[in-house]
């Protein structure tokens, strides 16, 4: 019961209230477990209190409560978001030393960080390491890499990964499609971008404002405004937003 309430408080960013409840349960000799600490560590990370989260991690280990993959994933992701990649990698090494196998969430956090600082080769290395260690990449893994390849104008590499997704029956989501469509538009391959947009509709993926803006921007720059407005599924509200911007 305490864990449920603490977890809910932490997700609502009520970290101080959650910690007070944790203190109350300890005072009543209701001993916290790994789930209690995971909720609190995650709560502190959500509000940017990484130092406090690390303190709780050290406390749980000193009490012989073994962290699990979720504990490490919270901290690895938090380190990555703060740009502390060395500490994130140390967390990865500690996981493996303790016999805890990193999962796709762990690797995605590292890949995302490397991509944000434009170290795409390191991100690609992490991506390849996953498969070598028997961890299956998911749609987020591919979307991270496809988005970065498109940002640095390596659209052919992005397309290669996109085709690999289809081969492995990993279905792209709106982020995957939007990233690739944007990359294709900016590289002058509007025809294929339009084909992908149609594929999105066929697969039940609803394009968002980013998808529409990429295509409309490219069509307008190429003096094809009528074609942009006539495209099936293009809502007038999106056109108005684009023009007003």
Image (tube, rainbow, N blue to C red):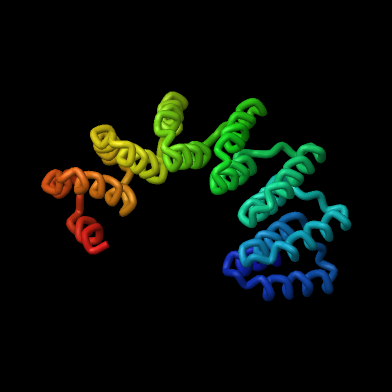
Residue 4 seen in the current view = no
Q: Is residue 191 left or right of residue 154?
A: left
Reply above or below: 220 against 58. Answer: above
Q: Front-most of 34 and 156? A: 156
Residue 59: image x %, image y %?
84, 60
- Which residue occupies 64% across, 28% down? 134
Tell me the quadrant of the picture where the N terminus can be found.
bottom right
Tell me the quadrant of the picture where the C terminus can be found.
bottom left
Q: Is residue 223 left or right of residue 70?
A: left
Image quarter of residue 122:
top right
- Which residue occupies 21% across, 47% down? 221
Residue 44: image x %, image y %?
68, 65
Residue 53: image x %, image y %?
73, 62
- Which residue occupies 19% across, 48% down? 220
Q: Front-most of 36 and 148? A: 148
Reply above or below: 9 against 98. Answer: below
Count of all numbered marks drawn on residues in the image: 0
Image quarter of residue 34:
bottom right
Residue 66: image x %, image y %?
81, 49
- Which residue occupies 72% across, 47% down? 86
Residue 208 seen in the current view = yes
Reply above or below: 182 against 213. Answer: above
Q: Is residue 234 left or right of residue 88?
A: left
């Amino acid at each position: 019961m305490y864990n449920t309430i603490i977890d809910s408080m932490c997700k609502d960013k009520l970290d101080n209230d959650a910690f007070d409840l944790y203190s109350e349960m300890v005072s009543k000799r209701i001993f916290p477990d790994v789930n209690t600490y995971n909720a609190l560590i995650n709560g502190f990370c959500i509000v940017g209190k990484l130092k406090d989260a690390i303190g709780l991690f050290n406390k749980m280990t000193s009490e012989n409560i073994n962290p699990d993959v979720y504990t490490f994933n919270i901290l690895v992701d938090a380190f990555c978001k703060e740009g502390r990649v060395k500490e994130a990698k140390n967390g990865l090494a500690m996981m493996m030393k303790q016999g805890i196998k990193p999962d796709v969430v762990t690797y995605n956090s590292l890949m995302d960080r490397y991509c944000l600082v434009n170290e795409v080769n390191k991100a690609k290395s992490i991506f390849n390491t996953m498969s070598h260690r028997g961890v299956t990449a998911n749609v987020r893994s591919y979307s991270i890499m496809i988005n970065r390849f498109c940002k640095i104008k390596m659209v052919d590499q992005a397309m290669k990964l996109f085709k690999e997704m289809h081969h492995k029956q990993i279905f792209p989501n709106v982020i995957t499609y939007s990233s690739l469509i944007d990359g294709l538009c900016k590289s002058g391959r509007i025809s294929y971008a339009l084909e992908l947009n149609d594929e999105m509709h066929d697969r039940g993926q609803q394009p968002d404002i980013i998808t529409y803006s990429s295509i409309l921007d490219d069509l307008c720059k190429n003096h094809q405004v009528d074609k942009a407005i006539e495209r099936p599924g293009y809502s007038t509200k999106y056109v108005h937003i684009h023009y007003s911007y």
